[in-house]
Image (tube, rainbow, N blue to C red):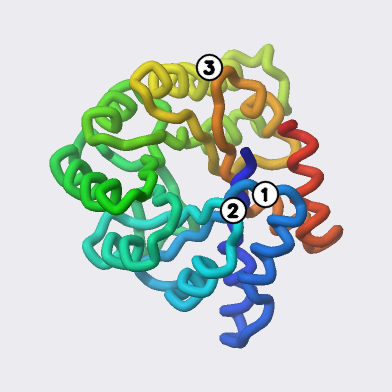
Amino acid sequence: MLGVNIDHVATVRQARRGDDPDPVRAAHEAELGGAGCITVHLREDRRHIQDHDVERLRGFVRVKLNLEMAATDEMVAIARKRRVSMVTLVPEGRMEVTTEGGLDVAGELERMKRVVGALAGDGITVSAFIDARAEQVDAAARAGFHACEIHTGPYAAAFVTAGGDFRHATLAGELEAVASSGNRARAAGMRFNAGHALNYHNVAPVAALTGISELHIGHAIVSRAVWVGLREAVREMRRLIG
């Protein structure tokens, strides 16, 4: 399944603090292009997606609505109130441009158990965005997560360095790390998702990994949409991962 992150549609809107482009219309176009999930990240500083976007999207989206968020009391309350389909817990830093690394589930296990329990109690699927490390996968299983979204940023960086040549040990190793973590998650009864920095050039090897359930992609699709439109940009990505 392709999950399309539409945060950067809201980034353009917020540059003028107006109403256009509307993330709800973006979600509609993504659905028509074949997205099986719409993802938005409601950040604590509200730099792009706003509370009213989540409210409107919850009533409009006809596929799965995935809310990326920090594991804070405020965000848990919002997710429970809006009854989103899925929550992906991510680390969040005020100065970062985008999410820079995986959630430290192992280091915050007891708090993660409480957060996951509260969300799951309302029927919300809960995913952990984590680095491709065995201890984090194991901790996610102990915390009760339903899925692990394996951080593909290191793989994407290695892909650029190696020019996409998998004879380079670093690139091959990063892909294997994603695959190994995904297999470990599946063996523990969790879904294997992946995302971050995936694009039209590097996505195919990840999409081909055994047992992968969902790919979450945003920036590359929204960037491509500047030239071909969002519906077609989603269709092109769907063809690549299909």
- Going by the numbered disc 2, the residue's amino acid type is Val
Residue on which disc 3 sits: 176
Q: Is 47 left or right of 163, judged from the image as shown?
A: left
Instruction: Give the total number of marks visible in the rendering.
Output: 3
The residue that mark 1 highlights is 35
Residue most extreme to the right: 228
Residue type beneath disc 1: Ala
Q: Secondary structure at mark 1?
A: loop
Image side of residue 98 versus residue 75, left or right? right
Q: Could you say which is closer to the camera, residue 174 or residue 17?
A: 17
Observer-side mark, 2 or 1, equals 2
Quadrant for the N terminus in the image: top right
| Residues tagged 2 and 1 counted as in contact (Cβ below 8 A) | yes
Looking at the image, residue 17 lies above or below residue 186 = below
Q: Which mark is residue 63?
A: 2
What's under tag 3, amino acid-wise? Glu
Q: Quadrant of residue 196?
A: top right
At 51% across and 60% down in the image, what residue appears?
Answer: 40
Residue 205: name its quadrant: top right
Q: Position of residue 99 (x, y in %)?
A: 45, 51
Name the disc covering residue 113, or none. Answer: none
Sequence-wise first label, 3 or 1? 1
16 to 211, vertically: above or below = below
